Amino acid sequence: MKPLFAVLALLLAFASGCNASSNGLAPVQTGATTAQARFVNGAPVLETGSGGTVVSLGAAYLQFDAATIASQFPYGSVTQYVSVLGTHPNSIELYDATGYSVGPIAVPPLSGGKSYSLVLVGSYPNYRILAFEDPLPTGGASIVVRNAASQYRDADFGTFDAASASGYVKRGSVAYGSEKSVSLGTSVTNLGAYAGTGTTPFPNQSSLTLASVDSFDGSSSLPFNASGRLSLFIIDQSSDGSAGPLLGVLDR
């Protein structure tokens, strides 16, 4: 029987070695502490130093611990969740096609079994990552707001009637670097959300409807399919005012 046991052990070792993540990250070692993370680009401009001058990056891609997470990572983008190791020092780097790069930028420690939204913020030469631990699903409808905008260090947020673009109601306030979650009950329709001062949205793109987040959600309803939570990110606005300061995605 010994040869049979040897063959089985060899096959198990081979299967374990082939268990690489489909998202391109390095294989996770057995027993390693893993977390789920998505990445948000809240830095309006990516710049780096070269020969004593400051140069702007072109279209950049994102790497986490030398593994490519997103082939395109423009300002205002949100990646899908990926599995990452949280038990050792992590960092991100951004590269463009010409070889210019930003980073490495340290990622705060992540706890295994939890999920995070990691937001790139700042400007040259002071970029950093803000790590927001995602709240656990509670059922029903809810919104969670994460303030990653140094321009709006104290922000109010709330909801409005999407169909009539009226009826703004303040739901809470959130300071820079923190997040707040609010339950909206079992379900809602015609839901719009904003960030601003009191019931007045910030300038430019600071209010949105669920239909604008997901075009299939025509009635701006939550829950929608498997999504019961609207995640909002307040980010620094681009210098020309053409983008920001509010991003929205639907979470499961």
Image (tube, rainbow, N blue to C red):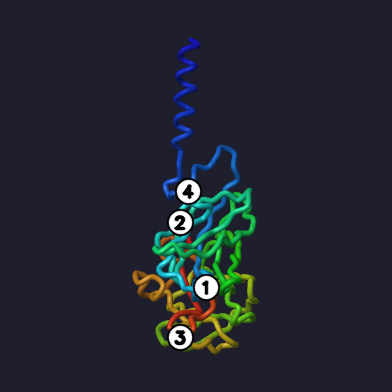
Q: Which residue is mark 4?
A: 25
* Mark 3–mark 4 distance (CA, rounded to whole Å): 36 Å
Residue to which mark 3 is pinned: 240
> Which badge, 4 or 1, comes first in the chain's sequence?
4
Amino acid type shown at disc 3: Asp
The residue indicated by pointer 2 is 69
Real-space CA distance between mark 4 and mark 1, rounded to the nearest whole angstrom: 24 Å
Mark on residue 168? none
Q: Is residue 185 visible?
A: no
Observer-nearest of 21 and 224: 21
Q: Is residue 187 left or right of residue 113?
A: left
Q: Residues within 10 Å of mark 2 (few under 14, many from 20)?
A: many
The numbered mark, 3 or 4, whose residue comes first in the sequence reads: 4
Amino acid at circle 2: Ile
> What SS does tag 1 mark?
loop
Q: Position of residue 154 (x, y in %)?
A: 64, 81
Question: Would you place residue 20 above or below residue 185 in this image?
Answer: above
The residue positioned 49% from the left and 75% from the top of the image is 45
Residue 75 placement (x, y as % from top left)? 46, 72
Q: Earlier in the sequence, mark 2 or mark 4?
A: 4
